[in-house]
Image: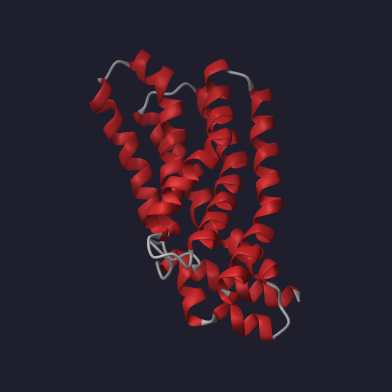
């Protein structure tokens, strides 16, 4: 079973990185950096203003970048009978979705965390703010990936699934955004514990919620 999981993970990660599912890995990264580059032009080059607001902008950019890969994250495999094939082999949708969740996070999470450093330089963020930002994204991006998997599964069989996915992800991801940005505003590392707890809960729920949604779509 572990070898099958590794095969699934490799296949899903390759598809996500090369763009077979949605936008691929480059577009979320470029989108994230574009926001960091354009924000100083919108509010002006004042370092004090950028330092106070830049961390929150990075969190918003990460949230929006997480939406980009959702189009086709699951719908293409649902249409081609991918999940039916694994069901015939005795593998549950929850198991397949666990591999998809890990691949989804690996395709954008680490890249966004690394991109924080050039973004922090563009936004004139202080060293402590950068540290909290990196730790927050490390704790929060798995939760964003989990919400993305759940929503992609819920909307996979709908015609307007891509537009609906973006509308659903933002409110569901707000708790992570609030506590993540709040830790920067209060300069309180302890607040990041809430980010990690919410993220862990979402990661635990996501395979079961997504698996149930896919079964409903297949049987519907």
Where is residue 179 drawn, in percent x and y?
A: 59, 28
Where is residue 125 drawn, in percent x and y?
A: 43, 23
**Colouring mode (rainbow / by chain / secondary structure / one colour):** secondary structure
Q: In this view, does 189 lie above or below 14?
A: above
Q: In this view, does 73 lie above or below 175?
A: below
Query: In the picture provided, is 210 more to the left or to the right than 90?
Result: left
Picture residue at 63% right of the left edge, 76% below the top: 7
Q: Is residue 16 above or below residue 134?
A: below
Q: Quadrant of the N terminus?
A: bottom right
Picture residue at 42% right of the left edge, 30% below the top: 120
Picture residue at 45% right of the left edge, 73% below the top: 76
Quick check: can you spot residue 131?
Answer: no
Q: Is residue 202 above or below residue 190?
A: below
Say how many tags the image has. Answer: 0
Query: In the picture provided, is 98 more to the left or to the right than 43?
Result: right
Instruction: Identify which residue, 172 or 121, lies in the foreground.
Output: 172
Q: In which quarter of the image is the C terminus?
A: bottom right
């Amino acid at each position: 079973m572990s070898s099958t999981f590794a095969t699934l993970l490799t296949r899903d990660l390759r598809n996500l990185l090369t763009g077979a599912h949605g936008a691929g890995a480059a577009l979320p990264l470029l989108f994230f950096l574009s926001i960091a580059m354009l924000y100083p032009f919108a509010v002006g080059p004042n370092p004090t203003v950028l330092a106070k607001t830049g961390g929150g902008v990075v969190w918003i950019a990460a949230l929006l970048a997480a939406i980009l890969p959702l189009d086709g994250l699951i719908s293409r495999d649902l249409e081609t009978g991918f999940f039916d094939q694994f069901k015939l082999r005795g593998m549950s949708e929850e198991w397949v979705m666990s591999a998809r969740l890990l691949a989804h996070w690996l395709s954008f999470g680490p890249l966004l965390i690394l991109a924080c450093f050039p973004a922090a330089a563009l936004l004139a963020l202080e060293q402590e703010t950068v540290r909290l930002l990196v730790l927050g994204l490390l704790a929060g991006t798995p939760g964003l990936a989990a919400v993305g998997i759940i929503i992609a599964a819920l909307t996979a069989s709908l015609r307007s699934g891509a537009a609906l996915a973006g509308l659903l992800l933002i409110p569901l991801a707000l708790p992570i955004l609030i506590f993540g940005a709040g830790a920067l505003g209060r300069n309180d590392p302890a607040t990041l514990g809430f980010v990690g707890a919410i993220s862990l809960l979402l990661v635990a729920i996501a395979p079961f919620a997504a698996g149930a949604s896919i079964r409903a779509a297949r049987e519907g």
